[in-house]
Image (cartoon, rainbow, N blue to C red):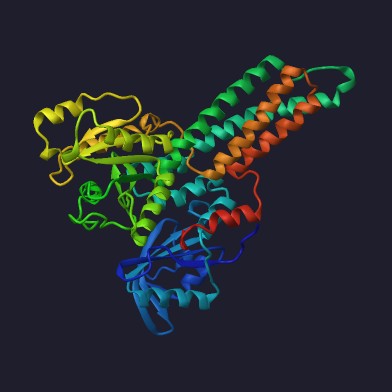
Amino acid sequence: MILDDTIVALATAPGNGAIAVIRVSGPHAINFTSTVFEGRQNIKLTEQKSHTLQLGYLKDGNRIIDESLVSVFRRKKSYTGENTVEISCHGSAYIQQEIINLLLKQGCRAANPGEFTLRAFLNGKMDLSQAEAVADLIASDNAASHQLAMQQMRGGFASEIKKLREELLNFASLIELELDFAEEDVEFANREEFQALIIKISKLLKNLIDSFAVGNVIKNGIPVAIVGEPNVGKSTLLNALLNEERAIVSDIAGTTRDTIEDEISIGGVGFRFIDTAGIRETQDVIEGLGIKKTFEKIEQAQVVILLLNAKEFKVPSSKFQVEIEKIKNKYPQKPLIVVLNKVDLLEEQQLESFKQIETPYFKLEAISAKQNIGVDSLKNTLLSFVNTGALKNNDTIVTNSRHYDALLKAQAEINKVQEGIDMGLTGDLLAIDIRQALYHFGEITGEITSDDLLGNIFANFCIGK
């Protein structure tokens, strides 16, 4: 893929603001901008040094469009690896469009989504996994997802893959060399060292694949379903967690008939809370549809909060046991937090008897959503379901489903290589599986790509990045 034209796009968010940045990149970026820019220092942009700024006027003939600050970045020293100009203009939507139109007249083309980062990848400024991390960084909305994106953009994940690929490629070359001397029955690749490398790669692949379970939820937020009978305080709890009046609260049972969702960050990790319709037998068609949707949301959730009413609390209580078992039996793999709400209405003895209940099958919490009692403890319990140890240790965590798929395929090929070693297969047969493993490693970093793959990846970027 060769991109030899010059592109332009708004790099900041569309709409009015204090300032806006328009980005131009390509072989003629500096020349095209120079024809419409008049610097106050009377220095032509074509003569301006890289990584310097100049204040001046953008003009359409004799008409001044704006007074702007223009930055010049030359070729390999720029983000894209080619001549780049960034225009910091006033944030009027009219001014932004006028400047872009002016540059289009000079010969620029409107940039496609992600085309600046695509050019950075094609020009060797970053590998494909780093380029994908740029989009993740822009989309990050909590500390954890930001940390993961920054780690990947700095090349932590890619460097591990590249190192493994180089070691495997070295052995593959030696095994391929053996094929040229098949009649002489010589071994250039030390089989013991090769075996140790395969074990090392298998272990690292397993760790990376296992990390996806953590990385995926951190990147996309952890969905938490709040369920229970009508009028137990689900909407009040949602409002308490979000610290705002997000859901309508009423003493009338069955107020919530559809799901309400919102997201907050707890301990730097995003949680998406889903307030659902109360679960009960009903003849109301609309409420029945809401209850049906409740079970759909439980299916999608990764954690379930079962809310119970403190006013009906007794130990032991067959009613509570039935409610808990109903959820736990239907969704045995989902973490369950049983929350006794309205504890401000309980006598101390009742509350103590609740706290003494111990079970390995679910977590227990006592709160008053209305009085904001115990809500922080509930948040800490939710955070305990997320393995943040790897995050704190700055370990490599996989967040991208494309990378995950490539790692699974690479692992399958490495397993075949191991099986081949155990069976004493000849080098030519081992080489086939090694090549396939190398191919899947290359897919991650972009050493092996196709136009369709690049198109799919960069189509999800915003225009101007």
Residue 398 in the image: x percent, y percent? 49, 38
Asked whether, in this view, residue 348 is left or right of residue 25, the answer is left
Q: Given the current orientation, which residue lies at the most extreme top position?
A: 192
Q: Quadrant of residue 423?
A: top right
- Please determine whether, in this image, residue 417 is positioned above or below residue 125: above
Task: Identify the residue at image location x=50%, y=44%.
Answer: 400
Q: Is residue 307 left or right of residue 7?
A: left
On screen, residue 365 versus residue 392, left or right, reads: left
Q: Position of residue 332 (x, y in %)?
A: 43, 34
Looking at the picture, tell me which residue is in the foreground, 299 or 455.
Answer: 299
Q: Is residue 73 above or below residue 215?
A: below
What residue occupies the far front of the structure in this picture? 283
Query: How many labels were placed on the picture?
Result: 0
- Residue 193, picture quadrant: top right
Image-based side of 134 in relation to 277, left or right: right
Q: Residue 393 placed where, x, y %? A: 38, 29
**Can you give x and y, in whole percent of width and height, for residue 80 in the image?**
51, 55
- Vertical arrangement, residue 202 with respect to residue 93, above or below: above
Q: Tell which residue pokes out farthest to the right in this image.
A: 183
